[in-house]
Image (tube, rainbow, N blue to C red):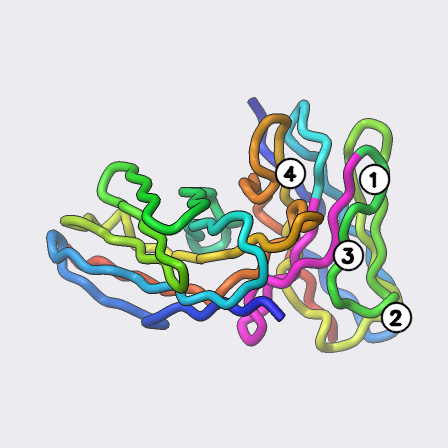
Amino acid sequence: KAGVTQTPRYLIKTRGQQVTLSCSPISGHRSVSWYQQTPGQGLQFLFEYFSETQRNKGNFPGRFSGRQFSNSRSEMNVSTLELGDSALYLCASSGPGANTGELFFGEGSRLTVL
Amino acid sequence: EDQVTQSPEALRLQEGESSSLNCSYTVSGLRGLFWYRQDPGKGPEFLFTLYSAGEEKEKERLKATLTKKESFLHITAPKPEDSATYLCAVQAGETSGSRLTFGEGTQLTVNP
């Protein structure tokens, strides 16, 4: 059974640009959530999607957005990038019948903003 | 606001030297407390879920316990392959879903 797949793994952008990150959850998992990980702030929740609907949202500015498609794949977008957006962006999925906090994480997309 | 504090920040052990990691939490309406392991360059890997005070879960050399204010991850006779960052997280509130509040983690190094 394939795990959570995130693309791209690494990317470099400059301030003011925008970026789109992609996530394919484990087959059969309909809940997808996104987290930002930085050395100073640790892991912080961005948002969660279930059946194409945003179910929860963290305390991030509106520049951070996401969506989920009918096949459960998800994308997140960050517009007008700032230096502080440099981070590891992790996608996670959770399966039916399990506690929604039991997350399967991908390896992340490491974003560097110059 | 939910808060999770882990200690120590870093721990260095000799192989076979047992120890415990601490996770203190302040939440309103705890639904679950989770332990994850994260290896360098990888995403966190789920280990345990604890729901109520007094509960314990075990897996190989790891045992997680929960009280009303903190959780401990006991590592018995650790091996070098147990070296990783261990993360504690809480899930609070009825509509929390996959919204977890994580601690900063404890970086464990086990020397052979």
Q: Which residue is mark 2?
A: A80
- The chain to which mark 4 is attached is A
In the figure, B76 relative to A39: above or below?
Answer: above
Residue drawn at (72%, 41%) of the image: A23
Q: Is residue A46 magenta?
A: yes
Q: Earlier in the sequence, mark 4 or mark 2?
A: 2
Q: Main secondary structure of the magenta part?
A: strand
In front of the other: A9 or A61: A61
What is the secondary structure assignment of the residue under circle 4? Answer: strand
In percent of the image, x 87 and y 66: which residue is there? Answer: A62
Looking at the image, residue A15 lies above or below residue A36: below
Q: CA distance from mark 4 to mark 3?
A: 15 Å
Residue span colored magenta = A33-50
Measure the C-alpha gap from mark 2 to mark 1.
21 Å
Residue contact between numbered discs 2 and 3, judged by CB atoms under 8 Å: no
**Residue B26 belongs to magenta span:** no
Q: Secondary structure at mark 2?
A: loop
Please identify, in this view, whether the residue under mark 3 or under mark 1 is nearer the observer: 3
Q: Does mark 3 fall on the same chain as mark 2?
A: yes
What whole-number distance in Å separates the C-alpha atoms at marks 4 and 1? 12 Å
For the C terminus of chain A, give its image quadrant. Answer: bottom right
The residue indicated by pointer 3 is A57
Q: Secondary structure at mark 3?
A: strand
Give amino acid for label 2.
Thr
Task: Identify residue for label 4.
Answer: A93
B69 to the left or right of B26: left
Q: Amino acid at mark 3?
A: Lys
